Image (cartoon, rainbow, N blue to C red):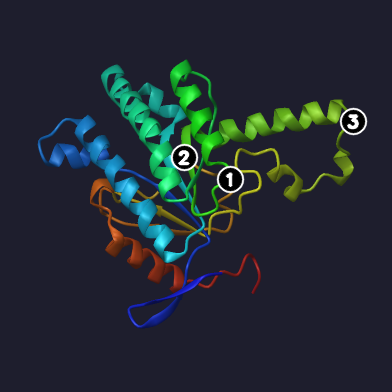
């Protein structure tokens, strides 16, 4: 695990950081702005956080961008989010290459427009060999949905006699998840003061440390990131042991 000197102390840096980027709409409302303005500012925050975590030595960053439940939001907000996503994906190829960042999108492609799916595929393909920060974007993602999809894959492999159920282990199930070959998160940060995981990485967060901040996502900055890492270093990760 990477260490850094932070505020005069040697600190362990999480190998994998997960973030629930919450509070864009409430942040915008507090400034008498439309919700889409908050989402736009939140996108800018993500870009800066990617740079900050990479500088600190984080290897994997997973962010909750759009859940399967978010389709229940007002149509105009969904359209604004999809337009913002299109812009983000288009700009990310050049920026990711410049910053040596691999991008992987997790979640189901169902309900996404064809042009968005094509942009996702292009971004993943053109950054697959980059070895700096790996950014995982949870898009149209719900953990229960992910687990059900994984179980269906297991059943297919069982029917095709590719696996022996009697020898099936937890570590083998990992390979059927969207996050296959990615280590579980060490630290989860949720912004906006909410204290729940909202159907995010239910399987992967089994032994993850949680840090909750009152800051809305557009206000999240390196100072708050450092606070989260200091908190992480104060925790004793026992993984079920004494």
Q: Is residue 32 above or below residue 118?
A: below
Q: Residues within 10 Å of mark 3 (few under 14, many from 20)?
A: few
**Residue placed most toward the observer, 83 or 119:** 119
For mark 1, give the secondary structure: loop
Give residue 9's position: percent from left, percent from top. 39, 82
Q: Is residue 113 visible?
A: no
28 vs 45, left or right, is left
Q: Residues within 10 Å of mark 2 (few under 14, many from 20)?
A: some
Q: Residue at x 66, y 48 (%)?
A: 181
Disc marking residue 161:
3
Q: Which residue is mark 2?
A: 137
Say which label, 1 or 3, has the lower sequence index.
1
Q: Is residue 52 above or below residue 202?
A: below
For mark 2, give the secondary structure: strand
Q: CA distance from mark 2 to mark 1?
A: 17 Å
Mark 2 vs mark 1: in front: 1
30 vs 202, left or right, is left
Q: Quadrant of the N terminus?
A: bottom right
Q: CA distance from mark 1 to mark 3?
A: 33 Å
Q: Are marks 2 and 3 in contact (CB under 8 Å)?
A: no
Say which label, 2 or 1, has the lower sequence index.
1
Give residue 169's position: percent from left, percent from top. 79, 48
Q: Residue at x 55, y 37 (%)?
A: 143
Q: Residues within 10 Å of mark 1 (few under 14, many from 20)?
A: few
Q: Quadrant of the C terminus?
A: bottom right
Disc marking residue 41:
none
Disc marking residue 129:
1
For mark 3, give the secondary structure: loop
Q: CA distance from mark 2 to mark 3?
A: 33 Å
Q: Residue at x 68, y 33 (%)?
A: 150
Say which label, 2 or 3, has the lower sequence index.
2
């Amino acid at each position: 695990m990477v260490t850094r000197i932070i505020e005069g102390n040697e600190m362990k840096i999480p190998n994998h950081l997960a973030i629930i980027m919450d509070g864009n709409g409430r942040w915008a409302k507090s400034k008498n702005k439309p919700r889409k303005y908050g989402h736009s500012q939140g996108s800018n925050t993500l870009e800066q956080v990617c740079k900050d975590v990479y500088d600190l030595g984080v290897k994997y960053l997973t962010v909750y961008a759009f859940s399967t439940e978010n389709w229940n939001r007002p149509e105009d907000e969904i359209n604004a989010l999809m337009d913002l996503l299109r812009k983000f994906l288009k700009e990310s190829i050049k920026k990711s290459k410049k910053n040596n960042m691999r991008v992987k999108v997790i979640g189901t492609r169902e309900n996404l427009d064809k042009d968005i799916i094509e942009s996702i595929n292009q971004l993943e393909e053109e950054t697959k060999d980059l070895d700096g920060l790996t950014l995982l974007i949870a898009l149209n993602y719900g953990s229960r949905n992910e687990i059900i999809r994984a179980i269906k894959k297991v059943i297919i492999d069982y029917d095709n006699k590719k696996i022996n159920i009697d020898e099936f282990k937890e570590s083998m199930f990992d390979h059927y998840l969207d996050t296959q070959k990615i280590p579980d998160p060490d630290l989860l940060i949720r912004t906006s003061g909410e204290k729940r995981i909202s159907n995010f990485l239910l399987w992967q967060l089994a032994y993850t440390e949680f840090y909750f901040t009152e800051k809305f996502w557009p206000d999240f900055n390196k100072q708050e990131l450092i606070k989260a890492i200091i908190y992480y270093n104060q925790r004793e990760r026992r993984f079920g042991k004494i």
